[in-house]
Amino acid sequence: MRAIVLGLCTAMVLLVRVADAQMPLPAAKPPDGATLFKQQCAVCHTLNLSEPMRQGPPLVKIVGRSAGKAEGFKYSEALSKAEFAWDDAKLDAWLTNPQAVIPGATMVYRQAKPETRAAIIAYLKEQN
């Protein structure tokens, strides 16, 4: 009798494992803009003017601001000559390939995923 019960328990465990293996895992929730900014942008940029300057300019109120004109930051010659204001389309193009937007720009970050760029841009807009 004990062998039968043990055999049945083993069979049930195997069935549960097979069922678990066939069930798809829930999709991971994509990171939000704040998390993406912290992971991918904050090493070089701040969102607070009271923090020390980093390698890149502060991005406080970046949407609508003239490119290459943040007070107190030394921009590359190419970016300091830019004649546009940052909007969704320019930020998206910039995050895709900065050198395509402004040849000679020194930012090396590139983000190929449109959904990641969109989340970062949405977060920056929230900070305005």
Image: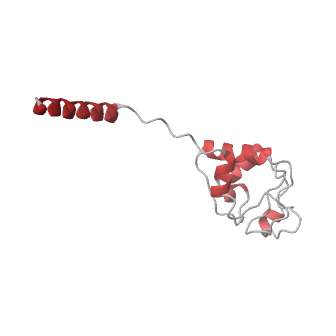
Q: Residue furthest front?
A: 1
In the rendered view, tell whether residue 104 sits above or below residue 23.
Answer: below
Q: Which residue lies at the image location 83% right of the left edge and 61% below the top edge? A: 68
Image color mode: secondary structure
In this rendering, position of residue 76 left or right of residue 114:
right
Spot occupied by residue 9 in the image (x, y as percentages of width and height) = 21, 32
Spot occupied by residue 82 in the image (x, y as percentages of width and height) = 82, 59
Q: Which residue lies at the image location 18% right of the left edge and 29% below the top edge? A: 8
Q: Considering depth in this image, is 92 or 58 the residue closer to the camera? A: 58
Q: Which residue lies at the image location 47% right of the left edge and 35% below the top edge? A: 26
In the rendered view, tell whether residue 71 sits above or below residue 19.
Answer: below
In this rendering, position of residue 45 left or right of residue 84:
left
Q: Considering depth in this image, is 118 or 126 the residue closer to the camera? A: 126
Q: Considering depth in this image, is 100 or 71 the residue closer to the camera? A: 71
Q: Residue furthest right?
A: 71
Spot occupied by residue 48 in the image (x, y as percentages of width and height) = 82, 59
Report how many numbered discs are placed on residues in the image: 0
Spot occupied by residue 40 in the image (x, y as percentages of width and height) = 64, 57
In the rendered view, tell whether residue 25 sits above or below residue 84.
Answer: above
Quadrant including the N terminus = top left
